Every structure is written in C-alpha cells, then in structure tokens.
Amino acid sequence: MASTGDVPILLLDVDGVLNTARADLPDGWERGTFNGYVLTWDPTVTARLRELHESGRVEIQWLTTWTTDADRLLAEPMGLPRGLVTHARADSAPTGFAGVFGGRSGWWKLTAAQAVAEAEPDRRIVWVDDDLAVQAADTGDWLAANPHVLVVAPDLFVGLTHEQLDAIEAWL
C-alpha cells in the first residue's frame, strides 16, 4: 500500500498488544517461538489489522522493541503484511522489551511517535501500545495538544481486542 497524506498511520506495538502475557491458549489462538521468545496471538485480530491496512483505511507502521524483527520474523506468521515502516530507538542503546526509556521525553516510543507526527502533520495517527497507560504522565501533555492522535492501550494480559478495533474503526 502506498503512503499517502490522507491515510491515517497506525503505530503498532507487539508485546502486550499482539502478543499477550498469558499461559493459556484460547481456542483459535496461535503460538510460536521467535528469537527464543514464545508469542501468543489472536489471528482474528491480526486479520482485521491486515484488512485495515490493505483496504487503505490505515498504514500500519511498527513501533515496537522488536523493531525490524517484527517485519522479518513476526509479520508473516501473524498474518500481517511484510515491508512495513519500522521505527526504532534513535540512540544505540539495546532495546529489550516494552517500557524501555530514552530520548527527549524519557520514553523512546513517545520520541518516535512525536517524530512521526512532526514528519506527517496532516495525517491522523492511531497509536496502539499497552504501555501507554503506564506512560500517561510522560505522554499526557503531548497527546492533549495533538487531538489527531488516538491512543489505545490494551491490557497486556488480554491484548488488542475486537472492541478496541471497533473503536479504532469508528474513530477513522
């Protein structure tokens, strides 16, 4: 899908959003091991994300500590498109898992989201990350000043839900 100024960007995290922190495997869910980590996801959720992207309703971009490994290792098995834009930390520190800090605001993902918003001032942004609730003190002022950014903070034990996808689609 070509990037255009009228298509909203969906910044997508992996851990706590697609990959849930749960031991059980609900009916219909998938599980796989990638880079030594076991991931569990709902393929009906990733199918809806793919459809939103392929229909041109959003342009999915990775904003995850998995960085390029999200595209290289996870996209295809999870049913998501390959070749998506990937945002990474601006510094050279190791990334690790969600909640890693760094950058001008304290949280490297906020710095990356701010850079996306600055580079694409006319595009709406949907930012899906389970750490958004934890980072509310860090992100609150910026989000309040940028009503064209919708944030969705899934519960890390549940992941992104169909109800949250419904809310995203209604906002779009």
Image: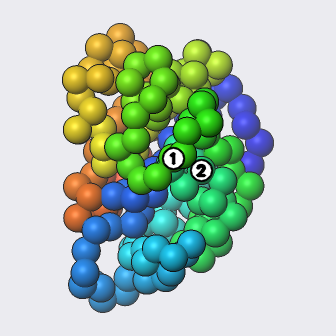
Q: Horizontal and vertical percent for residue 65?
A: 50, 50
| Residue 49 vertical placement versus 40 (above, below) | above
**Category of crowding for the residue at label 1, using alpha-carbon neighbours closer than 10 angstroms: few (below 14), some (14–19), many (at least 20):** some
- Image position, residue 31 (x, y; %): 43, 83
Q: Residue at x 51, y 76 (%)?
A: 36
Mark number displayed over residue 95: 1
Q: Which residue ends up furthest to the right in the rendered image?
A: 2
Depicted 24 relative to depicted 14: above or below: below
Cβ atoms at labels 2 and 1 below 8 Å apart? yes
What's under tag 2, amino acid-wise? Thr
Residue 87 in sight: yes
The kind of residue tagged 1 is: Thr
Foreground mark, 2 or 1, reads 1
140 to the left or right of 109: left
Coordinates of residue 39 in the picture (x, y in percent): 43, 74
Is the image coloured rainbow, by chain, by secondary structure, or in one colour? Answer: rainbow
Whichever of labels 2 and 1 marks the residue nearer the N terminus, that label is 2
Give the structural element (helix, strand or loop) at label 2.
Answer: loop
Residue 17 vs 38, above or below: the answer is: above
Q: Is residue 14 above or below residue 106?
A: below
Q: Which residue is mark 2?
A: 67
Residue 135 is drawn in which quadrant?
top left
Q: Residue, x 24% and y 65% (percent of image)?
A: 158
Label 2 – label 1 distance at C-alpha: 9 Å
